[in-house]
Image (cartoon, grey):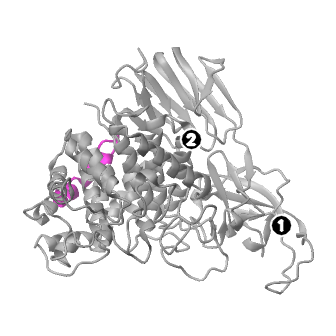
Amino acid sequence: MPITGPVSPLPGAHSVLRPLPLDAVSLTGTGQLASWQRVNRDATLAHCVRQLEESGALANLRIAAGLESGVFRGFVFADSDVYKVLEAIGWEAGRAGGGAEMFDSFVDDTVALLQTAQQDDGYLDSFFQVAKPDEKFADLRWGHELYCLGHLLQAGVAWQRTRARTDLLEVGLRFAGLVGQRFGAGGVDAVCGHPEIETALVEVYRVTGQRRWLELAHRFIDLRGHRSVGEDRFGYGYFQDHEPVRTVPGATGHSVRQLYLAAGVADVYAENGDPELLAALERIWSDVHRSKMYVTGGLGSRHRDEAFGDPFELPPDRAYSETCAAIASVQFNWRMLLLTGEGRFADEIERALYNAVAGSTTSDGTAFFYSNPLQVRTHRDGAHEQAPARRVGWYDCACCPPNLARLVSSLQHYAATTAAGSLQLHLYETGTIDLGGVGGVGGAATVARIRTGYPVDGVVTIEFDAPFTGGEVALRVPAWAESWRLTVNGEAAAATVSAGYLRVPGAGIRSIELVLDMPVRLRRAHPQVDAVRGCVVVTRGPLVYALEQADLPGSLVLEDFVVDAAADAELGPVDADLGVPLVRITGARRAPDPGELYPVASGARSPGGDAITVTAVPYYRWGNRAPGGMRVWIPTS
């Protein structure tokens, strides 16, 4: 049977699009996404497994199981790191050409450990079992018990879907049964301080067919907004418990919590069609993407509470932009894309993936950013909070690296969908799509082969092994694309564009070539983004570029360079070390330092000296060479 992926709405769900089977899409070649999956398999997963041991996350479970003695180590939600790594390996096990077998003994041993640590009533949370055995479910605001359970359930779903392995899911269902007894209909009216269980419960419903899990997810959503988490220094909005979901005007509070909740609401809507939930999702999405998102797709502008700020409060040097928030954006936008079929959601998946998410890890996949600033000052002294100037191998709060691993191992899930006998392509990457296992799609065509150098170039070629007939082939035209050319069966063709997609009628299609023009563009921010007024950002296609101190000549300091916004920026050479194309921009050295912190304003100060041409690197590759300053937004004067 075909393997379904992380999000799998049931037949009859309120979704315009349906994901293809996980094993129907293979990302191959040397493209960014395919290469990322290989690095994830070959380096990141093994790195995460080692860190689970070194951080104490596995030792905590052994202590809870009575196999070791000691004290609990790490954050209260350390169990979730274990579950996310298990989920990542589970999706790798379902990937064509994957190499999950090398982790079989780790998975077997860890599942056996969880079975041993689980208590007779189904409870499983090493922090409370080891450190506070008398306080189970006593602190839902900060205890993260249901959050951890959500990740356990999602790991179980991954293994059930890819290998038909049920023992891990059974562990999660025993714990979920206990939670249902305590917090289900007629039980305690309370929610977890960190949303996550909602989307997990919906996926469990999709796996088991047992409606009680969907009802429990719906109940948690309806209970949110009634201030059950209790008073806290961060306020109720931090936990999205300030106002009922159906009436919230927009996004607020902790960015990851907000988007995990939104993803869960989208899943519940997909299965029950409650129009008030869809309206709330649209308000949240619009608020985020029209006034609270960084140009990289990063989310969260406040370090204190890892939270959204006010509209247009987007300082580049203090961007928190947590990696998990960018991953959550992919998850939320994917669900909105399935619900509506609108390309704007795929555009935001692309923006986050190629910039904020990709930039969070080194090219070798073993060091990570927790937060992702858009500016690091040349003379920065040390690190602050979870924001080092260089990527590091792990964090005390290690939520991001294993979260990244589980996303990357399932990247093919987000590439294409089907609907009414048609095929929709959302992410462009060299690879194949097996249409043979997708009923009613393509007619005689059984394989689609895709070749592209995207996002370095905009040429996408699709060839079918037999004529594609019936339905249509829909190709996303990103919002950044100002012009494009389409060839069908070797001849120039016209096609209608709707909801962000070129729609090619399925009348004997053997080949399609889409060429998206990718000029370098300098873009400005909305005028209310005060922090970057008078600055521009360099973009090309979906990629945001950054200036690094390493690329500036001589004694020129990053903060002293100003760009000439009237001069043409152009594509430069491919950097041999980074393996990515650079962009050339022209500017000058800022006028000499007046020697005062606040000199008298005496008119505009002209740049000093001759024109200077410098190169910018894709944001996702910054920080892979020498340490030093970096900035995305470049002043024009």
Q: Residue at x 19, y 41 (%)?
A: 210
Q: Position of residue 193 (x, y in %)?
A: 34, 66
Which label sits on residue 538?
none
Residue 376 drawn above or below residue 280 = below
Amino acid at dot 2: Arg
Mark 2 — residue? 344
Q: Nearer the viewer, residue 397 or 432?
A: 397
Q: Position of residue 501 (x, y in %)?
A: 57, 31
Amino acid at dot 1: Ser
The stretch in magenta equals 88-111
Q: Residue at x 42, y 60 (%)?
A: 243
Tell me if residue 127 can be seen: yes
Mark 1 — residue? 637
Which is nearer the N-term, disc 1 or disc 2? Answer: 2
In the image, is 199 to the left or to the right of 152?
right
Image quadrant holding the C terminus, namely bottom right
Alpha-carbon neighbours of circle 2 within 10 Å: few (<14), some, or many (≥20)?
A: many
In the image, is 563 to the left or to the right of 548?
right
Q: Secondary structure at mark 1?
A: loop
Residue 37 drawn above or below residue 635 = above
Alpha-carbon neighbours of circle 1 within 10 Å: few (<14), some, or many (≥20)?
A: many
